[in-house]
Amino acid sequence: MAALHSAQLRLKIPNPDKRPLKLYLTLDPPYHWVLINVKGEVESDGEIIALDQLEIPDGVTEVVGVASGQSVTTRSVTVPGKRRTNVEAALPYALEESLSEDVEELHFTVLNWRAGQPADVAIVSKIQIRQWLEDCRAASIFLDRIVPAYLLVPLHSEHSSTVAVQEDGAIYVRTGLLTGFAMDREFFDYWLDTEDLPDRPVSVTDVELAKLMSKQQGSQVSHWDIGNRLKDWLPLSKDSAASDNISLLHGEFAPEHRSRNYRPLKIAALCGLLAIAIYYTAMVKEVRTLRAQDSSINSQMVQLFERHFPNEPYLGRPRFQLQSLLASHTGKGGLNEFQRLLTSITNATRQHKAEIEEVNFRDNSMTVLCNVSSLSVLDSIRQTLQQLPGMSAELLSSGARDNKVTGRFRLERS
């Protein structure tokens, strides 16, 4: 009860600045927990009997499950392949003969891999990892990572291996950055008798065990007083297992709460991509429509040009060509024939308040259709045009329809 009370009290330590913290939690009872700040310092620690007694404090950004060393095995194996996914798929079959369990019941994690080099692999029972996740989920604890406990044992800067004795008698041996194993004392004695350690400097956290190993293995064994508990190791564990993203949770065991956190962003991103796709499709359709209209207008323009200028080749620049044609009909310093006739009919219709509706010009002859207020106005326009010097004007037709009087004139230079 004292441990429980201490744990609950420590977990309720206020964090007014909302400092980011990392929680390490062992996955087998009794459950030990340690809060670590961003500097790797221990903020608090404790022990609980059941997971539902644990209250995650504010500010925890990551919950790391610490798996017992006896539950996770690490192996080093070389698997040919140039892609990590292919290597991961081949791992179970490469290790099948060396494992006592069916590979279908095991979960494999590649801890590190480089093409052509041995890969460090962690192996754990799928039943075990499901049980850990279910126990935590029932207590509303959602794990971000799971790491084997022996990979949190610190490595000495001058020694290649560390041996740590646990309170329950288990012995953790860390043999490299991402390799290690756990065993009981009886098997450790057997391992010590069969293992050749003279060329491998070893640090031992327990002084009595260090003396025993030194007698059997020589001066390469030394005592390293760093404690035997998780809270003692974490401040010294600056390696990848403690501080990076090494985790047994991937594939079918990937943390679901992390994917749920990113789901709104994924939905927003999908909506954005959909909007871009719709906009792009609409733009493509609009461009195609405009191109079709442009092609149709160009075709009509060519036909119109050829009809009115049958002897002129169409050069694709109608404005420039029309300006050139008009200029070719212009006398030195004066108006061309079209401009003279158009000026004459414009002045006459303006004088008699008539409206020009249609103009046609061909072979120095202009035909003009006018709208007037009465038939008498048509005759007045004709007389006005005939009075102009050098002008010949003829009323070709006239008529009235729907309260509209029209007349068609032909103008020529006499």
Image (spheres, helix red, strand yellow):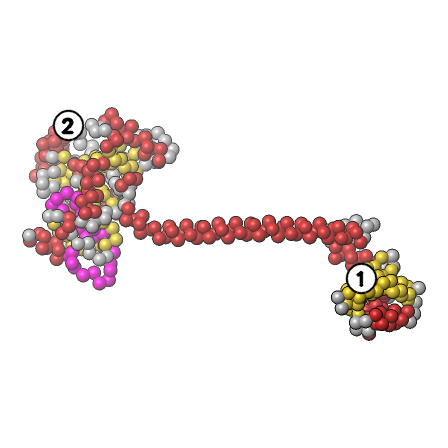
**244 above or below 334?**
above
> Which amino acid type corresponds to the residue marked 1 in the rendered image?
Val
Residue at 49% over, 51% down: 278
In the image shown, does 267 or 289 lie closer to the viewer?
A: 289
Q: Residue furthest top?
A: 97
Residue 252 placed where, x, y %?
28, 39
Asked if residue 207 shows in the view, the reply is: no
Tag nearer the camera, 1 or 2: 1
Element type at mark 1: strand
Characterize the local packing of mark 2: few (<14), some (14-19) or many (20 or more) Cα atoms within 10 angstroms: few
Q: Which residues are magenta?
A: 10-36
Residue at 87% over, 57% down: 363
Characterize the local packing of mark 1: few (<14), some (14-19) or many (20 or more) Cα atoms within 10 angstroms: some
Residue at 36% over, 31% down: 81
Query: What's the mark number on residue 359?
Result: 1
In the image shown, does 114 or 145 lie closer to the viewer?
A: 145
